[in-house]
Amino acid sequence: MIETNAIYVIVAREFKKFIRERSRLVSTLARPILWLFLIGGGMSRLVPAGGNVSYIQFIFPGIIGMTVLFSSIFSSISIIWDKEFGFMKEILVAPVSRFSVVVGKAISGMVISTIQAVIVLCLFPVIGLRLDVMQVVGVVLISAALSFTLASFGILLASFYESYESFSVIMNFIVMPMFFLSGAMYPVKLLPDALKAVSKLNPLTYGVDALKNILFPYETGRMAADFSLSVDILIIVIASVFFVLIAGKLFERKQ
Amino acid sequence: MKMISVEKLTKKFGNMSAVNEVSFDVEEGAIFGFLGPNGAGKTTIINILCTLLAPTSGKAFINGFDCDRESSRVRQAIGIVFQDSSLDKDLTARENLTFHAYLYNVEKSVRKQRIDDALRFVDLFDRADDMVRKFSGGMKRRLEVARGLIHRPRVLFLDEPTLGLDPQSRANLWEFITTLPKQHKVTIFMTTHYMEEAEVCDKIAIIDKGKIIASGTPSELKKTVGGDVIYLRTNDNKKAMEDIRNLFELDVSEKDGEIFISTVRGDACIPALIREIGESVLSVRMQRPTLNDVFLRLTGKEIRDVEGPGHDDIKSMVRSYRSRHDRD
């Protein structure tokens, strides 16, 4: 059952808090920008361009993916905060289905992450990329779909944890490996077989790959996308439905 | 009409029974108090009634709906003020109430009016657009009560509503709570471990170790501990005691130079005493039994003695630590 009023107000609350906390916006944007210019800039001197794509351009889709990943997971993890500070109880005793709560939280993550992805996307001229309108629209849509998927995944994680301490566990053992094994920093096809297999289970891989498909449509060399765009989109959509349903179920548990 | 009805409710966590075959009813419009030390099972029962926990066995009904099976009907019918604040401190008072109104599907046409009324009712209208972060403990609690009433519930749960408040805010809050049943046509279900606060209840159930050990009106319960005690100082205690024994057939004894008399109706007894032996009396005082005496008699211990380990202190320490670090 979907309650639009409840979903609307859950999203509105997160959005309002996001707008008010400028420092959070600055700190979540600082990370991708630092990675792009410090790592991308430095590594470009070491890693030769493949085809028409330089290394700093190659990691650009990965950096957008990173922005979406951190911001979506962070937004979902706020559920742990809400549990810890009691606000979750206000939501849980309301006559609202758990599924609506999960969808509301996932949409919150989607809205907030997409805004940040768009801000990072605006850097494209700085690193020498030329994009047409359709490419920009494509990146925004993929970022939105990917962030919904990752936010749902974050909710699923958050439903296992009660306290704030778990936050660093999630960050170090789930989020960082997800980032490195997504093809963000190096092409999946260059990974050893074992890691390649793990990459293929990572939803972020397909998000980053979809962005590569959109940003470098004509690239064929080692800097090119690993899968086709339709495969990427299909997997993102399937993953989002899967995560949202599981998270909804986990949320429904009563002790 | 019975607004809340609980039948043989049991909740086990592993092998430990937090609630053990508890049964009680609450009439519509009453203020019902659940008394007991921390860890007695009060919050567990509230959580079951609020549909947050499933009972191990037994049944609970609110407004005729099964708390376990008809969760959403029950949720619509109840408002809750939790022991720990459940406000969003980074939103304003009005935003917290608006959030609630949307969540409970309060009709758009009445939404603003209800929120304004609620804010006025708890005397926070002037602070409506301030962040809750800036509010004092008493203000937060009042705001939570206001929020709990926005969707016009039939039952309002108050779990330790005065915990952590200073004496004055506590007194104010009680004055305010007692007006609720008439003003909002709501039944109140509250828990407390401050015995003196339970005096305002129409009916009380005393719970210890997951079981109800006594229930009734405050005066009924107090009668069970034997009524009032009158203390007298006289210029000749021996003679006075003899006179009292002869004239009133009352149980009299002496301690620390004071005569004390146990009787059911102390207030009616004093004038008679003064009439008969008034000339020798230097001072009179009377003590009425408190609910604390009731608890003491039933369990053999003071309610304060059995408070759980300093759990709340640890929790609040952890919280304040986190609130300092949670933006990192």
Image (tube, rainbow, N blue to C red):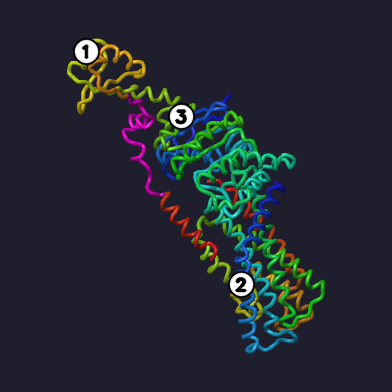
Disc 1 with disc 2 on a shared chain: no
Give the mark nearer the N terminus: 1 vs 3.
3
Nearer to us in this view, A210 or B183: B183
Residue tagged 2? A179
**Cβ–Cβ under 8 Å for marks 3 and 2:** no
Residue at image location 55% in from the left, 53% down from the top? B133
Q: Distance of mark 1 from mark 3, alpha carbons?
A: 40 Å
Q: Quadrant of residue A35?
A: bottom right
Can residue A117 be seen here? The reply is yes
Residue tagged 1? B243
For mark 2, name the chain: A
Residue at image location 76% in from the left, 66% down from the top? A141
Which region shows up in magenta? B286-311
Q: Amino acid at mark 1?
A: Asp
Indicate whether residue B291 is drawn in magenta. yes
Residue tagged 3? B204
Residue lying at the far right of the rendered structure: A133
